[in-house]
Amino acid sequence: MESTFSHIFDNGTLSIVGQELKEIPSELGFQYGYKTSTLTLSENLLTTVNNLEKFSKLTSLILDNNYLSHTQNFPSLPSLQTLWVNNNKIESLDLFLNEIEAKFPNLAYLSMLKNPCCPNYFVGKDTISYRRYRFYVVSRLPSLRFLDSAPISEEEKREGRRLASMVARPKPEEYKKKAKEAAVEEDRALPVEDNLGNHKASFGVSRYIYYGRQSEGNRFIVDEAL
């Protein structure tokens, strides 16, 4: 079947730019995946990164000027070193970094300018907000050498290490786990109230905290010693 889009392949680089693609064509992986090191899909209409599994040797992935959100499911690409996603629709920095951290362990160059999650002058944010953003990204991705339009400085590396040591984050697969046992017995999880239905509602700080099995906090307890 003849392709309805134009593309250029030259010396390991596959470029499909400005073709109004809404998804990555599956035939590309079969034809070029095994021999492509750089894939450029800028200025399309992409909302998802499907059909990348065959590109197992990618070192650079350019996805600028599309419609990608933070809810992506990238394939595992240990060889990927460069990811450009400028001018997309990425809102949640934390969720997007979860995916990058899990799928691209050797990423060295990342650019997310002109996304809602990137607080820089393109989206009306000040310098302080952008510095905090850089510190946080470096803390999550310590292998980075270049972020957005500038290399990672020694100060940013130090601050990233400090932040990472302060916050021990569970691995992405740990978030769905629950504690094996309730912190207290179920019959003691909530206070016993007499004359239910005869008391007035009150506002303020409650003396009671729920520590039962279904507590949301238990979803993040992964220490086997607990």
Image (cartoon, rainbow, N blue to C red):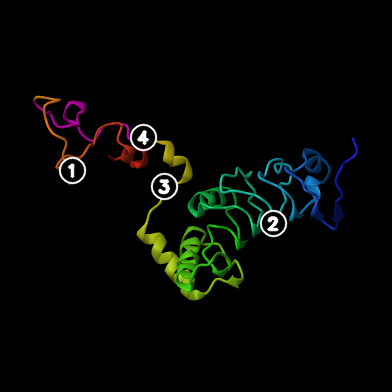
Quadrant containing the N terminus is top right
Q: Nearer the viewer, residue 151 or 1?
A: 1
Direction from residue 34 to residue 67 in the image, left or right: left
Q: CA distance from mark 2 to mark 1?
A: 49 Å
Residue drawn where x is 70% and y is 55% of the image: 61
The three-letter amino acid code for the residue at tag 2 is: Asn
Q: Is disc 2 surrounded by few (<14), some (14 to 19) or many (20+) residues within 10 Å? A: many
Q: Percent position (x, y) of residue 123?
A: 55, 64
Mark 3 or mark 4: whose residue is earlier in sequence: 3
Dominant secondary structure, magenta: loop
Circle 1 residue:
203
Q: Earlier along the polypeptide chain: callout 4 or callout 2?
A: 2
Q: Which residue is mark 2?
A: 65
| The magenta segment | 178-194
Farthest-out residue, bottom? 154
Earlier residue among tags 3 and 2? 2
Residue under label 3: 170
Report the residue that reaches farthest toward the left. 194
Residue position marked by numbered label 4 in the rendering? 178
Up the image or down, 156 lies above or below 105; here it is below
- Residue 49 is inside the magenta segment: no
Q: Quadrant of the C terminus?
A: top left
User: Residue 87 shows which numbered tag?
Assistant: none
User: In terms of sequence position, does the residue under pointer 4 or pointer 1 come before the other?
Assistant: 4
Q: CA distance from mark 3 to mark 4?
A: 12 Å
Asked if disc 2 and disc 1 are in contact, CB closer than 8 Å, the reply is no
Whether residue 198 sits left or right of residue 44 in the image: it is left
Mark 4–mark 1 CB contact (< 8 Å): no
The amino acid beneath tag 1 is Phe
- The Cα–Cα distance between marks 4 and 2, rounded to whole angstroms, is 39 Å
Count neighbours of disc 1 (C-alpha within 10 A) and say few if under 14, some if 14 to 19, many if 20 or more: few
Amino acid type indicated by mark 3:
Pro
